[in-house]
């Protein structure tokens, strides 16, 4: 049985490399450098270990937003 993703229905996908990992005991913050800027994700530290994420790892950030707020500057 393969663990590879064969298809996914997410339009906002950003390929990039892991730039920084801030590990916590339960959750960790992952900064991904993409051609469009930095995308930050907060995931469980267990997932960081299971995905074997390291600085420089090639990843895809999948963004699904159910709400986008706008503030005037």
Image (cartoon, rainbow, N blue to C red):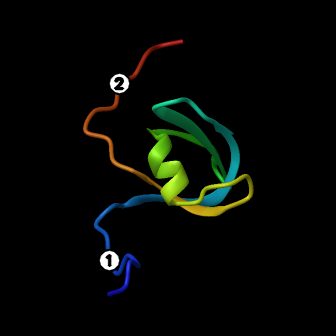
Q: Residue furthest bottom?
A: 1
Asked where in the image residue 70 lies, by quadrant, the reply is top left
In the image, residue 53 lies at what x, y percent? 61, 56
Q: Residue furthest left?
A: 66
- Give the residue displayed 46% in from the left and 50% down from the top: 47
Front-lying residue, 8 or 47: 47
Q: Is residue 36 above or below residue 41?
A: below
Mark 1 and mark 2 residues within 8 Å of each other at the beta carbon: no
Would you call the spot at circle 1 few (<14 residues within 10 Å), some (14-19), or many (20 or more)? few
In the image, residue 69 lies at what x, y percent? 35, 24
Q: Which mark is residue 66?
A: none
Would you call the spot at circle 2 few (<14 residues within 10 Å), some (14-19), or many (20 or more)? few
- Give the residue displayed 37% in from the left and 76% down from the top: 5
Q: Which residue is mark 1?
A: 7
* Label 1 element class: loop
Asked where in the image residue 22 lies, by quadrant, the reply is top right
Left of 19 or right of it: where is 41? left
Front-lying residue, 53 or 5: 53
């Amino acid at each position: 049985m393969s663990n590879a993703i064969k298809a996914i229905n997410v339009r906002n996908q950003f390929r990039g490399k892991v730039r920084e990992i801030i590990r916590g005991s339960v959750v960790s913050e992952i900064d991904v450098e993409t051609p469009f800027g930095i995308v930050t994700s907060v995931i469980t530290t267990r997932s960081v270990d299971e995905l074997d994420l390291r600085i420089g790892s090639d990843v895809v950030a999948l963004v699904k937003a159910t709400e986008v707020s706008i503030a005037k500057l």
